Every structure is written in structure tokens, then in C-alpha cells.
Amino acid sequence: MIVQKTSVFPAGRDDVFQKLQRLETLQYIARPYATFDPAGNIQHTWTEGSTSSYYFRLFGIIPYGIHTIHIVRFDPDVIRSREGNKHVPVWNHDIRMEVIDDHRTKYTDRVEIQAGWKTVFIWIWANAFYAHRQKKWIRMLKEQE
């Protein structure tokens, strides 16, 4: 199943891309729906070809295993990661960013989810999660204006 959400962010694409490279951004925008705490070596930035793992907790309290993120493509136009854990083996996430002007970026999250019989439940949660993430992104970017 596919989740897709699009918003217009109040920042230039380069600013959004710079923030996307930092683990702290993910941790901020994911709360309270999810928390990501490094499992093993701490990787504070992502780069193409990198793989990192995180202790994933639903709503910050329910352990949901080790979530692994492998970055397949990482540039200002598209970020493509292949992710998963024992409960959700396929979480293919693409982020697309399109320049509107120097101060606005069209941002799209597109996620393919495959989790067997749990897929529909994960899909419902992921729809709410990505709507929340984009709202938190907008709040964070407005606070930094």
C-alpha cells in the first residue's frame, strides 16, 4: 500500500535539504508518533549509500524493534531510502522536493508499505504520521524564519 502526502514548506529547497541530512530533524518531526534512538554507532547525518539502525518506539513508548534505514539516493531533488524492521519488512520512502521560489518548496513524502496482514493497520498509522511530520516541518521552518 502507498501513503503519499504533499505540503508547501515555507523555506527554500536548499534549507530543507540541509535539515533533512540531520538525525535531530527526524527525531523532532516524528515525535510523538515515533521515536528513533540510534542502535550502535551514532550517525548524525545521512549520505547516499549509508545504512543506519534505530530503536523504534511507537508513540515513544511501545517498542517496535530495530528500524534500519538504507539511503539509496540523496540529493536536493529526491531522497530515496529503503527501510524496514521485523514488523514492517518493506518501508520504501521517497522524498521529493520541488522549488517553487526562493522561500517555498513543494515537499512530498511517498511511502510503499508491505507488512503482510498488518499492512492496512500500518498504512492507517502512516497516513496520520506523515500528515503530522509535515505539520511539524512547517512549524519548525516558521520558527526559524
Image (tube, rainbow, N blue to C red):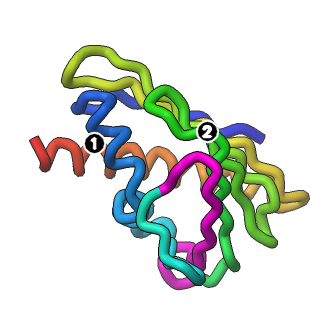
- Whether residue 19 can be seen here: yes
As measured in the structure, the alpha-carbon distance from the residue carrying label 2 to the one carrying label 1 is: 24 Å
Instruction: Report the magenta residues as a range.
Output: 46-62
Instruction: Decide: is 78 above or below 143.
Output: above
Is 41 on the left-hand or right-hand side of 114? Answer: left
* Mark 1 surroundings within 10 Å by alpha-carbon count, few (fewer than 14), some (14 through 19), many (20 or more): some
Q: What element carries label 1?
A: helix
Looking at marks 2 and 1 on the same chain, the residue that comes earlier in the sequence is marked by 2
Mark 2: which amino acid? Arg
Q: Residue furthest top?
A: 101
Name the quadrant containing residue 94: top right
Is 7 on the left-hand or right-hand side of 34? Answer: left
Q: Residue 136: x and y, percent?
A: 32, 51
Q: Residue 46: x and y, percent?
A: 50, 55
Q: Mark 1 points at which residue?
A: 138
The residue that appears at 59% across and 34% down in the rendered structure is: 4
Q: Name the residue under label 2.
A: 73
The residue that appears at 83% across and 58% down in the rendered structure is: 115
Q: Which of marks 2 and 1 is in front?
A: 2
In front of the other: 9 or 51: 51
Asked whether 136 falls inside the magenta stretch, the response is no
